Amino acid sequence: MTVRNRLQQHPLLSRWLPLLAWMGLIFFLSAQPDLPHPESGFLDLLLSSGGHVLLFGVLAALWRRVPAGRPGAWPPALTLTLLYALSDEFHQAFVPGRHPDPWDLVCDGLGAGLGLALYGWGQRRQNRPEQELRT
C-alpha cells in the first residue's frame, strides 16, 4: 500500500499533515540567520515580500482545507494564519541576524487573503456542473 493510499484512508491525517509540514518549513526558513538574497534593495524587497505572500497564502489555504466541507471556515483559517505570522515575527526576534518587520506582517496578511480567495475560487469552480464550465 502506498503512502497516498494510506493517507486517503485517513482524511483527517491527509488534511493535517501538509499543514504541519508547511508550518515546519516556515519555521525552518525563519530560523535561518541569513537567507540568500540579491544585493539590490528593490529586488530584495520584492523577492522577500513575494516569498511572504506565497508562504502565508499557501498556509491559509491549508488551514482552510482542514475542516473540509464547512463553508464558514475561512475566518478561523485567516485568524490562525495571522497568529502564526505574528509568532513567526516574534521568533525572528531571537534569531541572530534576523529581526521582526511589520512589513512582513502586511505581506503575510495579503498572502493569507489571496490564498483564501484562490482556495474559495477553486472550490466554487470544482463544484460547478460540467455544463457550466463549457460555456
Image (spheres, rainbow, N blue to C red):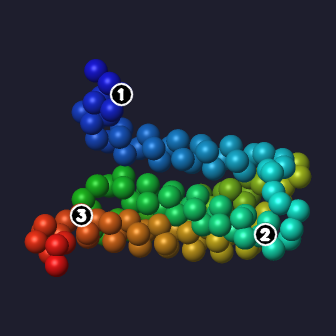
Q: Residue at x 73, y 64 (%)?
A: 48
33 to the left or right of 83:
right
**Label placed on residue 3:** 1
Furthest toward the front, the residue is: 134
Quadrant (top left/top right/bottom left/bottom right) for the C terminus: bottom left
Q: Nearer the viewer, mark 3 or mark 2?
A: 2
Q: Can residue 79 be seen?
A: no
Front residue (pair 15, 54): 54
Furthest toward the bottom, the residue is: 135
Q: Residue at x 44, y 55 (%)?
A: 62
- Mark 1: amino acid: Val
Image quarter of residue 44: bottom right
- Mark 3: amino acid: Gln
Disc with the residue nearer the chain's start (2 vs 1): 1
Furthest toward the top, the residue is: 1
Q: Residue at x 24, y 59 (%)?
A: 69
Under circle 3, the secondary element is helix
> Distance from label 3 to label 1 (Cα)?
25 Å
Q: Which residue is mark 3?
A: 126
Q: Nearer the viewer, mark 2 or mark 1?
A: 2
Residue 58: x and y, percent? Answer: 50, 58
Front residue (pair 83, 32): 32
Q: Are marks 3 and 1 in contact (CB under 8 Å)?
A: no
- Mark 2: amino acid: Leu
Residue 31: x and y, percent? Answer: 75, 46
Q: Which residue is mark 2?
A: 43
**Label placed on residue 64:** none
